[in-house]
Image (tube, grey):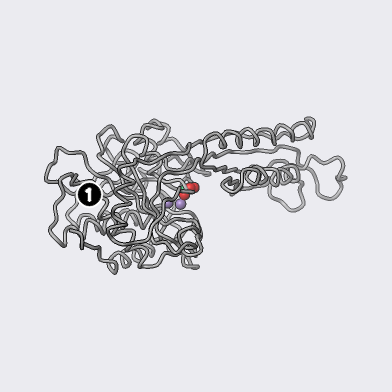
Amino acid sequence: MAGLSVNGERLWQSLMTMAEIGATAAGGVNRQTLTDEDRRGRDLFREWCEAAGLSVSVDRMGSMFARRQGKDERRPPVLLGSHLDSQPTGGKFDGALGVLGALEVIRTLNDHGIETQAPLEVVNWTNEEGCRFPPAMIASGVFAGVFDLDYGLSRKDHAGNTIGEELQGIGYAGERPVGHRPVGALFELHIEQGPILEAEGRRIGIVTGGQGTRWYDCEVTGAETHAGPSPMEVRRDALRAGAALLEEIYQIAHRHAPDGRATVGEFQAYPGSRNTVPGRVRFTVDLRHPDGGTMDAMDHALREVFERARGRHAGRIDCQVEEIWYAPPVAFDPDCIDAVRQAAAALRLSAREIISGAGHDAVYMARVVPTAMIFVPCKDGISHAEVEYASPEACADGANVLLHAVLARANA
Ligand code: GLV
Ligand code: MN
Ligand code: MN
């Protein structure tokens, strides 16, 4: 089986066809979770899986599992996959490469009539991105027992819709219990979403773990008043006070350079009228670092920023921060990492070990299942953007490593 390789052309065609669903004018994808676009993406994925002879089941969080029987059906399945949901201005590859690369592995095994000892399941996790329904990786989190099912189904979007309602709405509220079954291993193929592989000219990232992520909801409250008659000194301008916090927040990441990250991705002022002084702002903070202790220090520093601000404003403006999610740093399984390393070496693809900067379903699954990830380079390290791009060669490289890592594990 050493010379076995995927059909890179077919994988590319599948990626481009999937990217037509939710395609944006600027060449990206808006296929946010549990929207009609997500439903269409899921339907297409299901159709392709069934055409490849897989049996598809859906769990109560809407995650899809497409199973290929093993020679020994008593063995727990090897899972391979990622997510089909996207950011609002996302790209064609984040998540889709992992799902369709996994499907390409199955199609390749079918082409060559190869059976595996353990069954294989291609998975499409619900709501990896978390942009519509925070937090991210919620369905894999429920699978791994990090969250309970009620918590998962009750998460709300900005309009107040819950995951449970929206799953019903798109017809993907499955019946299968979430998790509570043995899984032999999990492999997730993904674009790197950072600049390291491309800069070093490496074709494969052997992912050894993922950094920590903390999400916060922040609110600054002052008072609305007229933009003209109200003197500057008497205003309780929530936007001005909130904006003054931003640089202090970014400095938390700089103080933990080079790995610290701080992002304010949402910022809304109310009532949002040009001639009314804003009485309230809400914004989000995303902090990241690969080290758990440093994550705690950054969390502490953020709370101090808000405490100092409350002191400065002496009761006239209130500044509140609430942590809504923490996914601690995680280390992947040495044997699964080794399966990726061996596969890259056998394929003579230059590789290096790397830590994931982004969150992935593999991060939660690693708590309960031996797990590893495979990265391939993406152009300029950019993702969560419509210009996101990975070459057909890079996609095929990643799928080939996935193929051989999965074969090794499923036949061990
Ligand atoms: C998931 O895409 C993340 O925010 O890392
Ligand atoms: Mn992703
Ligand atoms: Mn993403």
Task: Say left or right for 279 vs 66.
Answer: right
Q: Where is residue 334 in the image (x, y as percent from the top left)?
A: 34, 41
Residue at 24 percent of width and 58 percent of height: 48
Task: Say left or right for 411 vs 286.
Answer: left
Instruction: Compare residues 68 and 162 and report the one nearer the observer.
Output: 68
Residue 348 lies, with reference to residue 138, above or below; the image says below
Instruction: Compare residues 182 and 201 and report the one nearer the observer.
Output: 201
Tag count: 1
Quadrant in which the C terminus is drawn: top left
Residue at 47 percent of width and 65 percent of height: 379
Residue at 16 percent of width and 62 percent of height: 111
Ligand 2 lies under 8 Å from the Cβ of mark 1: no
Task: Say left or right for 216 vs 38.
Answer: right
**Which class describes the residues within 10 Å of circle 1: few (<14), some (14-19), or many (20+)?**
some
Q: Where is residue 386 in the image (x, y as percent from the top left)?
A: 49, 63
Q: Position of residue 76 (x, y in %)?
A: 21, 39
Task: Say left or right for 325 vs 113.
Answer: right
Residue at 65 percent of width and 43 percent of height: 255
Instruction: Compare residues 286 and 66 and report the one nearer the observer.
Output: 286
Q: What element carries label 1?
A: helix
Residue 326 lies, with reference to residue 7, above or below; the image says above
Residue 58 lies, with reference to residue 97, above or below; the image says above
**Which residue in the structure is indicated by mark 1?**
408
Quadrant in which the N terminus is drawn: bottom left
Q: Where is residue 119 in the image (x, y as percent from the top left)?
A: 18, 45
Could you say which quadrant of the image residue 285 lies in? top right
Question: What amino acid type should be assigned to the residue bearing mark 1?
Answer: Ala
